[in-house]
Image (tube, helix red, strand yellow):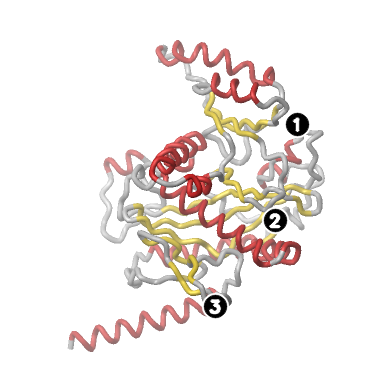
Amino acid sequence: MKELFDQGYFEEHMRINHFRNHYELTRKDLMVKNLKRFKRQYDREQNKLESLKWDFFPTTFVLPSEYHMFVEEFKRKPGTIWIMKPAGRAQGKGIFLFIDLKDITDWKKGENKNTEKLNDPSKDPPEIYVVQRYLSNPYLIGGKKFDMRIYVLVTTFNPLKAYLYREGFARLSGTRFSLNSIGDTYVHITNNAIQKQAPNYDPDKGAKWSIQNLRQYLIAKHGLEEVETMFRLMDDIFIKSLQSVQKTIINDKHCFELYGYDILLDSELKPWLIEINASPALTASSQEDYELKFRLLDDTLTIVDMENRLTGKEKRVGGFDLIWNDGPVIVEDCNTEQSRLNSFLGCYNDREEQLKKLYRQILLNRKSQKIEQN
């Protein structure tokens, strides 16, 4: 990737599906570093009520560099369950839960040898992990834990321009949730790459539920107002996380990024950011999953617009809604007649009708331009 940017020449129409240093938001350790830094800046500039809106990621430490800070926090809150994740791996690999400090004593040895290893080029430095307070009260469906995969498309960071896809899915565990079995990855890790290895996995049924179905289920159980509040909190997560790296990401007009956000709900319907993926899986686990990802990619390429057909002012393109364009994109709510963010996650995706209207408008614009030129 680095060689591509350093040595490559990009013609005007060419596009790359990553920004040069996209890992600032998608590596688990760097994501936490940037979120914490921006939160501190926000705390200094805003009031305490506003800073509470940053309470959307669990208490997190980077190991081995913050091992001693973690131990202090661990001792302050005995009995807390923690989760360890390799900073640079994906698909649930290397993740485990623990409640006893002796389960990670190897990290103390790694901390002591860290400087020695870094000074010796023949030795690999210890692998970086993040350790987070485990959310032990997840919202359950049928007694099973789940998380959500949501798609956000960024076409530029300077100024920031972000689109939210209407569709996504919930990934359910195939095993009933219990804190009595923290060693069972099939209970606690909802990643599809882990779940399909479970002995009770049914490839025909899969382990996914559309965001539309999830939204309807939650509204039936908790009412529209409470669920709308939950989705607005999710919008805050998308925007604030992108703002945290807005000045860090190296912007390039040839680049775009399709992020896969992993969000977990707790029993109070509070959304938590788990991680952000730079290359969300696009392989399909079912026909429904295939159709969703086909629509997602089709609409992504429409927005990337290598043919230069769009004006750049469109608030909606296919299943994507523009939520931020150097500031919040506001629309009027038909139900309340109040202004709100242009976000429709989990709502009906009538993308084909919308694209037909969009293309008709493009043709009209071209005709009017020709008339003006003549």
Earlier sequence position, callout 1 versus callout 3: 1
Label ID, residue 123: none
Which residue is painted at 38% across and 60% down in the image?
A: 327
Above-or-below relation of 196 to 306: above
**Residue beneath disc 2:** 208
Q: Is residue 269 left or right of residue 162?
A: right
Calculate the distance from the C-alpha at mark 2 to the C-alpha at mark 3.
31 Å
Distance from disc 1 to disc 2, alpha carbons, whole Å, reads 23 Å
**Circles 1, 2 touching at the beta carbon (< 8 Å):** no
Q: Residues within 10 Å of mark 1 (few under 14, many from 20)?
A: few
Query: Mark 2: which amino acid?
Result: Lys
- Nearer to us of marks 1 and 2 is 1
Q: How many marks?
A: 3
Q: Are marks 1 and 3 in contact (CB under 8 Å)?
A: no
Mark sitting on residue 334? 3
Q: Is residue 118 above or below residue 374?
A: above
Could you say whether the residue bearing mark 2 is in a helix, strand or loop?
strand
Q: Nearer the viewer, mark 2 or mark 3?
A: 3
Assign a secondary structure to mark 3: loop
Q: Which residue is mark 1?
A: 183
Foreground residue among 158 and 117: 158
Q: From the image, which quarter does the N terminus lie in?
A: top left
Q: Residue at x 62, y 30 (%)?
A: 84
- Image quadrant where residue 2 sits: top left
Can you say whether 240 is above or below 78 in the image? below
Amino acid type at circle 1 is Gly
Mark 1 residue element:
loop
Residue 28 % position (x, y) = 52, 37
Residue 345 location, quadrant: bottom right
Q: Amino acid at mark 3?
A: Cys
- In the rendered image, residue 288, in percent from the top left (x then y), is placed at 66, 64
Whichever of callouts 1 and 2 sits on the residue coming sooner in the sequence is: 1
